[in-house]
Image (tube, rainbow, N blue to C red):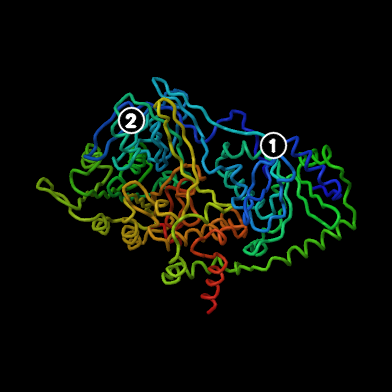
Amino acid sequence: MVLDIKENKSKSTIYVPDIATIKKVEKLSPIEKLFTIVFDDPKKQEEFSFRPGQFVELTVFGLGEAPFSIPSSPNNKKCFQLCVRDIGNVSGALHRMDAGSKIGIRGPFGKGYFPYDKMRNQNILIVAGGLGLAPVMSLIDYILEDRKNYKELNLVYGALDPESIIFKDRVKEFEKRKDIDIHLTVDNTDASWKGNVGVVTKLIPAIECVPEETFAVVCGPPVMYKFVVKELEKKNLRPENIYLSLERRMECGVGKCNHCHIGDKLACVDGPVFSLWEIRNLKEAI
Amino acid sequence: MLYKILKKENYTDFVEKLISEYEFIGPKKKDKVFHDFVPIKDLRELDTDYKKTTIAPAKKLLFPPTEELVEYEVGDVIKVKPLVESSEKILFGIDACDINGMNFMDWIFSTEFIDENYFAKRRKLIVIGKDREPSETCFALSMGAEYAKDGFDIFLTELEDRYFLRIATSKGNEITEKFARIQDATDSDFRDYDKFMDDYRSKFKLKINIDNFYDDFEFIYSNEKYWEEASKNCYSCGSCNLVCPTCFCFNVKDDMQLNLKVGNKMREWDSCMIPEYGLVAGGHNFRPTKENRLKQRYRCKLKTFVDKYGKYACVGCGRCIEACLAKINIVEDVNSVKKEVSA
């Protein structure tokens, strides 16, 4: 079988990142920033196409690499964005970088994406918690840019407190728009807050949906999935129509290093987005 | 496959020629107990009749414990250079179950994406296998890995006065034609080989009750008491992973030289048995306890790749049983799962 693997003339490897430049840095919350990135090679930038839910491996040269989902729309071919929380080595270093800094990018990776193609002419219910709004923003923008081909669009978003809400301008915009219903809640309130208080699961029962014609998308901290799935099952949504984006430690991104194993699946190549049906009997998954 | 015969009187001459012509890696006695695959310069260093498994499997030649993947120079312009090493080598005296372990690694590093850092080395590795008596801890027969069907260029089976050669590649054929006095295998050679293989298989005494494990694992999965008992002595040291011919987990790291100008991206072996393995940024650990981790190891070896690869990711070499400081024994554990289910 070894003979079947053709000689690689370029002698390049899957671990070589492409050089890119940070064009813009925006503060989204006390711990999250949005980075706008463009590949230095215009041809690479032109070719770079991804699907909502996919991720890239970002290298801070000399320090390390970490995976980030892409929150910007796949239709934007001029640049892409990454929303990063200051929490680890790589993300911490990234937060100290300004516009003009050089980074490395590998990807996009992941065969499992939010199935925008299957969702056409269906209702969509998106449930996001905390930083989990970032990966689904790509899907939301994609749908809003092709709005007539989708039915009802509901977004349930829960944050720790009003200050922690990311994409605040976008959230405000969604609140004004008629073609997306946003249901916002925070765990801890402050004096300025007039909206819902509590976890996202509290808001799900009130949302009306036709079970056979609804796709659900869930993205948030690991603890959230089990409870949200329970609520969605109560609404009789089909398990093959519930999609979950699962976070794991993805080191290589290409299905080799094995860190992101969930039962017989690898989050990096089989996911990071899975249908509930796919992972139903994988007890470690959610 | 070509079947040839090499008479014993011509064996030494054949191997000596290979040692002088090629970079030659083979098993060498390291101390009272262990052998290791190391470069061999003189035939006297070579000892293919090792009784215990080699301390480290031959995977280290293709997938070294640490390996630089990419080199880069930072500055106004960042220059990135892939580091792909490949030089022709002979790997001699590897046994059937280790070849099967390498076949699994070939599959891992070629599935979805081709890992050129691995395959550049693999393409240039000439594998000459040789049968070996099973060690006390070897259960390769139960795993269906005691016999290598492919993954080698030449495989030598020692009969009474001659070697029975299976030649799987044109490279293997080229080498034997150039360096060995060989002849075609006759009916009587095949008869002796068949007898040898029956006898060889009868020497595998250790049996693992693996047949129903795929489903039985789901039965035992949530039995906390079982996993607590099975993992209670585990030191989370990762020795089992380091000696395993099919363990392939690694970390990807970036490193910078002290001049802060040249850095590299490298990989190093990782272990699913150490606590940091499932840790993500923010402090959440997907496998915080040793129960979780042992369960994951068994699942990975005996179930996950039955789904993906169609075969077990364990070749039954028995190295992990020898290496474990806490005497955790995969054979005993799997057999006890069977007992629990059938009780």
Q: Which residue in the rendered view is the most extreme toward the front?
A: B32
Q: Which residue in the rendered view is the most extreme toward the bottom?
A: B343
| Residue for point 45% across, 65% down | B233
Residue closer to the observer: B47 or B63: B47
| Label of residue A36 in the image | 2
Residue closer to the observer: A53 or B292: B292
Horizontal relation, residue B98 to residue A42: left or right: right
Q: Amino acid at mark 1?
A: Glu
* Residue that numbered label 1 is attached to: B23
Provide the secondary structure element on which disc 1 rests. strand
Q: Is residue A174 above or below residue B98?
A: above
Residue closer to the observer: A53 or B161: B161
Horizontal relation, residue A38 to residue B211: left or right: left
Horizontal relation, residue B301 to residue A167: left or right: right
Q: Position of residue B6 (x, y in %)?
A: 85, 48
- The chain that hosts pointer 1 is B
Q: Amino acid at mark 2?
A: Thr
**Are dots 2 and 1 on a single chain?**
no
Q: Position of residue A67 (x, y in %)?
A: 40, 41
Q: Within 10 Å of the Cα at label 2, are there few (<14), some (14-19), or many (20+) other Cα atoms?
A: some
Q: Position of residue B245 (x, y in %)?
A: 59, 52
Q: Which residue in the rendered view is the most extreme toward the top?
A: B76
